[in-house]
Image (spheres, grey):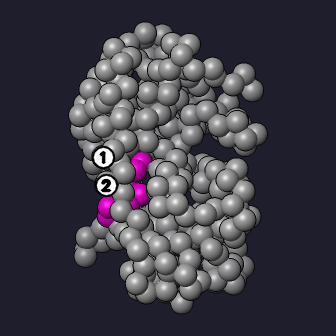
């Protein structure tokens, strides 16, 4: 039976550390922008704000009407960029179809981009000089490090190629000297790849997408999926995979709490960059 890589103990420790750093910095500000009322987004945001406030961060959950125009949204972002009290800006995705997500993200000051999605930050990650990196991949790497799971030299397989999870975790694993394969919806013979994986990261968004027979004996399985079903929240990996893997993240209680902790850590990092306490790579 796999050892479970539980998120809450480490996430709680990080949140306590963040609270200490926030005190040292004399306060921090985080603003999230939500356009419209997607119920799942509302839950994620509420958790982020509760955690932020628990760590002493002034956080504002700004709700914008679903019919907001692109110019109005860009105007809000510009206002937050120039607000000295705001250290971090997070635009909750997806945006309604009439808004250009890439343009909205590009409008954020890269120094306040706590989701790490701005092309400048994504480019630095690609170059191996990470700055603000998406929170979920950071949380995964922290969990692996906490459990002293060796990544160097491992065959790592990532299923999913989103900008927020799949691509950045592949880059972080590469930086940690894993041999990385990225699989996606057009991958042929997925099982052949997953059965080779010493570290398997699954970020698909499909309940129990990875079954036990796709998992290598003694491997490490990181289940990023959050799927709301009639049986409650389930991951992308069937629970029987724990009979095959040596380590596995539970859902809920694995990667999710780590994501929230890392958003807070990113907010501290953003504040340090902007206040000149940490050097921001120039590219
Ligand atoms: P996404 O929809 O942007 O990406 C899904 C990826 O899965 C795509 O890149 C696609 O190529 C791949 N995929 C789809 N069908 C496939 C198939 N048949 N075979 C192989 N690959 C396939 O999703 P995302 O934003 O990366 O999120 C993925 C999941 O992780 C979702 O369940 C989301 O809710 C969850 N999530 C959890 C956290 C957390 O903190 N735990 C954070 C972000 C996302």
The picture places residue 221, in percent across and down from the top left corner, at 51, 72
The picture places residue 67, in percent across and down from the top left corner, at 38, 33
Q: Which residue is mark 1?
A: 12
Front residue of 151/52: it is 151
Q: Main secondary structure of the magenta part?
A: helix
Above or below residue 249? Residue 141 is: above
Q: Residue furthest bottom?
A: 213
Above or below residue 243? Residue 203 is: above
Q: Report if residue 31 lies within the magenta region.
A: no
Ligand 1 within 8 angstroms of badge 2 C-beta: no
Q: Is residue 72 visible?
A: no
Q: Quadrant of residue 5?
A: bottom left
Q: Is residue 21 visible?
A: yes
Quarter of the image with the C terminus is: top right
Q: Are marks 1 and 2 in contact (CB under 8 Å)?
A: yes
Q: Which residue is mark 2?
A: 8
The picture places residue 1, in percent across and down from the top left corner, at 40, 84
Q: Quadrant of residue 28?
A: top left
Identify the residue at horizontal 46%, vertical 83% (top origin). Answer: 241
Q: Report if residue 258 lies within the magenta region.
A: yes
Seen in the image, is 153 located left or right of residue 216?
right
**Number of residues whose C-alpha sits closer than 10 Å to that of mark 2, classed few (under 14), some (14–19) or many (20 or more):** some
The picture places residue 184, in percent across and down from the top left corner, at 65, 67
């Amino acid at each position: 039976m796999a050892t479970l890589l539980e998120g809450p103990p480490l996430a709680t420790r990080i949140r306590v550390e963040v609270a200490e750093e926030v005190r040292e910095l004399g306060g921090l500000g985080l603003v999230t922008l939500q356009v419209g009322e997607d119920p799942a987004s509302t839950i994620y945001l509420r958790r982020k704000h509760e955690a932020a406030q628990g760590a002493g961060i002034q956080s504002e959950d700004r709700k914008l009407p679903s019919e907001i125009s692109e110019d109005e949204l860009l105007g809000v972002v510009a206002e937050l960029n120039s607000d000295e009290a705001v250290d971090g800006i997070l635009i909750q995705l997806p945006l309604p179809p009439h808004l250009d997500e890439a343009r909205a993200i590009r409008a954020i000051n890269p120094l306040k981009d706590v989701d790490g999605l701005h092309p400048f930050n994504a480019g630095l990650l690609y170059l191996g000089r990470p700055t603000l990196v998406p929170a979920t991949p950071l949380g995964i790497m922290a969990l692996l490090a906490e459990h002293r799971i060796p990544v160097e030299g491992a065959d790592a397989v990532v299923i999913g190629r989103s900008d927020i999870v799949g691509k950045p975790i592949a880059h972080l694993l590469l930086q940690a000297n894993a041999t990385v394969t990225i699989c996606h919806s057009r991958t042929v013979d997925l099982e052949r790849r997953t059965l080779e994986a010493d570290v398997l990261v699954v970020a698909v968004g499909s309940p129990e997408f990875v079954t036990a027979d796709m998992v290598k004996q003694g491997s490490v399985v990181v289940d990023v999926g959050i799927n709301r079903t009639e049986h409650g929240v389930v991951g992308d990996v069937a629970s029987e995979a724990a009979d095959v893997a040596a380590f596995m993240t539970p859902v809920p209680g694995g990667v999710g709490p780590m994501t929230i902790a890392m958003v807070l850590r990113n907010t501290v990092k953003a504040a340090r960059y902007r206040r000149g306490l940490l050097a921001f790579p120039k590219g």
